[in-house]
Image (cartoon, rainbow, N blue to C red):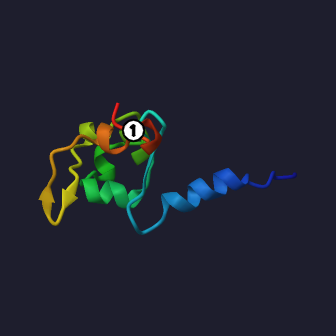
Amino acid sequence: MHLAAPSATMASLTALQYLPVPVLVLSSQKTVVLANEAMARLFGIGYESINDLSISDVLQDKTMGELGVDILQNGSPILITWEVRLKPPYLGSR
């Protein structure tokens, strides 16, 4: 029996999943693609509440605004949306 070696991408994603620091990967549409276990703890999502799903499955396709994540500056929330904040710089202020 011959087992295929994991691809570099799969090995990287697995490593991200178990990092002790929260990781949230967003798509080009600014929605969640991957979240790790530390992010689940930060959001207060317990494994008993998500059954057989991964934290990435639970948060899949949600925007930062839908997750209720605020942008802070010097400990105070700033009044700007994530969509504006995550806009690529080459688009300017259109």
Instruction: Choose between 87 and 1: the one closer to the eye.
Output: 87
Residue 34 percent location from the top left of the image: 47, 46
> Residue at horizontal 43%, vertical 39%?
57
Viewer-proximal residue among 8 and 31: 31
- Rendered location of residue 70, percent (x, y): 20, 50
Q: Residue furthest left?
A: 76
Which is more toward the observer, 32 or 91? 91
The quadrant in which the C terminus is found is top left
Q: Secondary structure at mark 1?
A: loop
Q: Position of residue 74 (x, y in %)?
A: 16, 66
Q: Is residue 54 visible?
A: no
Q: Where on the picture, by quarter, is residue 39?
A: bottom left
Q: For this view, does 19 lie left or right of residue 81?
A: right
Name the residue rendered at 23%, 53% in the picture. 71
Up/down of 12 relative to 28, above or below: below
Task: Kindly identify which residue carries mark 1.
Answer: 92
Whether residue 65 sits left or right of residue 4 in the image: it is left
**Residue at image x 30%, y 59%?**
41
Could you say where residue 60 lies in the image, as x and y percent from the top left? Answer: 41, 37
* 23 shown above or below 30: below
Amino acid type at mark 1? Gly
